Amino acid sequence: MAEFSQKRGKRRSDEGLGSMVDFLLANARLVLGVGGAAVLGIATLAVKRFIDRATSPRDEDDTKADSWKELSLLKATPHLQPRPPPAALSQPVLPLAPSSSAPGPAETDPEVTPQLSSPAPLCLTLQERLLAFERDRVTIPAAQVALAKQLAGDIALELQAYFRSKFPELPFGAFVPGGPLYDGLQAGAADHVRLLVPLVLEPGLWSLVPGVDTVARDPRCWAVRRTQLEFCPRGSSPWDRFLVGGYLSSRVLLELLRKALAASVNWPAIGSLLGCLIRPSMASEELLLEVQHERLELTVAVLVAVPGVDADDRLLLAWPLEGLAGNLWLQDLYPVEAARLRALDDHDAGTRRRLLLLLCAVCRGCSALGQLGRGHLTQVVLRLGEDNVDWTEEALGERFLQALELLIGSLEQASLPCHFNPSVNLFSSLREEEIDDIGYALYSGLQEPEGLL
């Protein structure tokens, strides 16, 4: 009964505050117009949301009246266009009159003419701000890209030589560096260089099992099962030492290689040879190498991979997964995503990849949007990219706003299906509080996109 009374009192308080908000918005439209009411509405709802969070606990059955989703009522409000400066402001301004201590007319040089001040800068459009942001925050000098590729290639050769000497019984394929740096999708130093370490599995001894058919029930993953045990018993393959319950365990293999990279490799000697400092990252469960050069810094992600089994073109990665999926292999969709974006842009000379880089840089520069990674943003651009709309540079600002709207709609549903595997929801790992914070930041950015740049 006390709980019911508490909820009832909270509901009355919310209704009273909601009525006050409605009253303010209704009168603001009469005085300030629709655009001014939109700005006032955002500020009012932000204060209401802050007060509610500070004074009352969250209930599971609460309708989240203080959520950012209330701002969807303002979604149809037209954006305020910046007013052009008055004509007088764009005219040259004469210098101020000289003071009494200045020389008189007889002492001045008749040939000296008054200098006119430069015109006041005009307001930039969203399109112009995006292009300036791309130039200053996204574009990487070609010299740095070439140096990063050279360092990654040299590290791949050194690491491959070490693996062959340390584990001569394990057949690894050629170590191949790749990733956004090689596909023109590098958005700053935060993107890792991908160094694929492929396993060479014997044909006919291994098969793939979808993750949904295992005890983990994870559609992102696959299990690599050992087969033909009656004809080729356990021990016939060098990879049998990593079997767990008849499946090739990614976790066991990762533990072996992590210990080797951290304790056995002579990184100071390799770094001295390549002219840089290399050290393995001990804070991450991934196999990461931090590289420091006098001209740049980069991170190399060592990705142990199963490139394909029985003519299957799927690329599976040994990834630090949790729970029942710990021994499974994560399907890597980056190669097909990058190839699809490239094909779409080549078809119509579009700017989809440029939009992806802009979104990545914007989210990394905003703490509230830090949970949105490259994987989330790639799915948004792919969904937009399939539409037959204008993808020229002149429409980049419009596509940017459209991407924000699509992200907001997906957050409202707490669902972002994978483009190549719709059964995978990329928002499934986000908590409700994180979705709430991201959605509010995106709504605010949609009303004033320049604030994100």
Image (cartoon, helix red, strand yellow):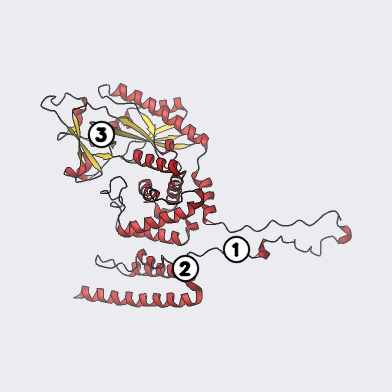
The quarter of the picture where residue 52 lies is bottom left
Residue under circle 2? 39
Dot 3 falls on a residue whose secondary structure is loop
Three-letter code, disc 2: Val
Give the camera-side residue of 404 and 286: 404
* C-alpha separation, residue under disc 1 versus residue under disc 2: 20 Å
Sequence-wise first label, 1 or 2? 2
Which quadrant, please, contains the N terminus? Answer: bottom left
Percent position of residue 447, x then y: 45, 62
Q: How many labels does the image show?
A: 3
Three-letter code, disc 1: Pro
Sequence-wise first label, 1 or 3? 1
Residue 51 seen? yes
The crowd level at tag 1 (other Cα within 10 Å; few <14, some 14-19, many 20+) is few
Percent position of residue 154, x then y: 42, 27
Give the camera-side residue of 162 and 110: 110
Percent position of residue 413, x then y: 30, 59
Residue under circle 1? 84
Question: In this image, 137 relative to 239: left or right?
Answer: right
* Proximity of marks 2 and 3: CB atoms separated by less than 8 Å: no
Three-letter code, disc 3: Asp
Percent position of residue 268, x then y: 41, 28
Q: In this view, does 294 lie above or below 161?
A: below
Q: Residue furthest left?
A: 230
- Taking the spot 24% from the left edge, 67% from the top edge, the residue there is 61
Give the camera-side residue of 24 and 333: 333
* Proximity of marks 1 and 2: CB atoms separated by less than 8 Å: no
